[in-house]
Amino acid sequence: MDVEVVGRALSTLPEDDDHPYRTGPWRPQTTEWRADDLEVVEGEIPADLDGVYLRNTENPVHPAIRLYHPFDGDGMIHVVGFRDGKAFYRNRFVRTDGFLAEQEAGESLWAGIADRPALSKRQDGWGARTRMKDAASTDIVVHNGAALPSFWQCGDLYKLDPLTLDTIGKATWGGGFPSDWGVSAHTKTDDHTGELMFFSYATEAPYLRYGVVDDKDALAHFVDVPLPGPRLPHDMAFTENYAIFNDFPLFWEPELLAQGKYASRFHPDMPSRFGVMPRRGDSSQIRWFEADPTYVLHFANAYEDGDEIVIDGFFQGCPEPPDPRGEGVYQRMFRFLALERMQTHLHRWRLNLATGQVKEERLSERYTEFGMINPGHGGRPYRYTYAATQRPGWFLFDGIVRHDLHTGTEERYALDEGVYGSETAMAPRVGSTGEDDGYLITLTTDMNTDRSECLVFDAARLTDGPVARLRLPERISSGTHSTWAPGSALRGWRDGDAAEAAGTIGL
Ligand SMILES: [Fe+2]
């Protein structure tokens, strides 16, 4: 392994930090690494695995103004690239405006999600609730050759070179980027059209907006999606012809909002609603469907089946788990991070465009979330979802589940005790001939060895265990979302010169 340190961030966190999500598997990194020719600990890197796995993690570097929530940390992207049977690794902080300002100030300037925006030291900021730091720390996709990390409370989309992870600028979309509201995490890319779909939300009417960016990186479509009030959409779905929005009955309490307080509450007496709109349609064409009350963080996929729109996602049986009074503020905060407390099950909604009816069914009895699919099947019929199981009570992934939606069966690979994975992406094999003809990739945080590894599985044989284990230079923090981009989607990939590639992204 050829390793060098390429950067270090200033950290003012105390040496004896005891925050449960800044220690242990969530211990933040401050060092940025370049490592080539990664050491293969076990197995062999498949020669037909070609492209990059990207993962976003939260890495706080300053004590919070008051309360730290794990989703407040600064976005650090990790990349493992596979080419010709070898692998490289990089990790870099996203150079957001907020990260740079706090590096210069040497302290937190914005209050996190668990605090009131009024506590922020700066008057400006980002996010649906305003005066927040856009940490670009939630999701990541690759579109038009650039890696685009995003933030769940809405913010800018920073453009990163997917090979070097250098922050090159912000998405402008030909001047069409909606800077007033920003863009939410969970932008959607359609491999078949080269489009990126996105949504933005805010506490002012119309509360939700939706847009399409074309394969030339221009904003091609942008419309209002009026909702009855401020909502907290975290994800959207799409099919070949439709964009699907949600209006779930979990949202910031309107009376408290008026006082500048942001407290979400679930309303079990209100239905969930799905809005179906042609991908280039407008609000006059939205059809709304009512379903059982729930909240959904993530959808696995959606597709058309005759008159029906089929949507698969993770239904929460208990979107607002009981308040564990007396157990402290952190336990109250973290109950919203525990799958078994929210009771998240893979679920299917069928919306009938001809009759207006909705049918629902539970697809799995297991608590899973963070379902990934073969990216070529996004918005199209599909069979497999690769999801995560969680260590009870913690935002830590302790296993991978392969759901077979045709047979209704599933199999699980359990990580060793004390080893936590990341959101597991599916990478189709070069020359792939079937939906599960490819690899599953995840990064581990191993508390037994104080190391991290990249694990590669045969997607069709998950329970056989990894076909390759690669060692990373440092133990990484746990985090949230990931993606896969094939080498064919990366400019300069075959030149083998990442620096040159950075100049060809077309920013
Ligand atoms: Fe998410």
Image: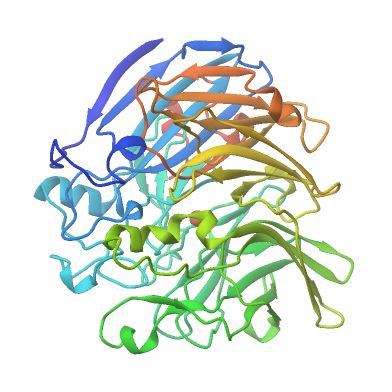
Q: Which residue is most to the left?
A: 105
The image shows residue 374 at horizontal and vertical percentages of 70, 41
Going by the image, does 122 lie left or right of 501?
left
Q: From the viewer's perspective, is residue 60 above or below residue 349?
A: above
- Quarter of the image with the N terminus is top left
Relative depth, front residue between 108 and 396:
396
- Residue at 37% x, 71% y is 128
- Residue at 45% x, 73% y is 201
Going by the image, does 63 lie left or right of 1?
left
Relative depth, front residue between 151 and 468:
468
Q: Which residue is most to the right?
A: 306
Going by the image, does 387 lie left or right of 1?
right
The image shows residue 166 at horizontal and vertical percentages of 35, 36
The image shows residue 123 at horizontal and vertical percentages of 17, 70
- Residue at 70% x, 23% y is 464
The image shows residue 439 at horizontal and vertical percentages of 67, 29
Q: From the viewer's perspective, is residue 503 above or below residue 382?
A: above
Relative depth, front residue between 236 and 291:
291
- Residue at 21% x, 63% y is 111
Q: From the viewer's perspective, is residue 114 above or below residue 209?
A: above
- Quarter of the image with the C terminus is top left
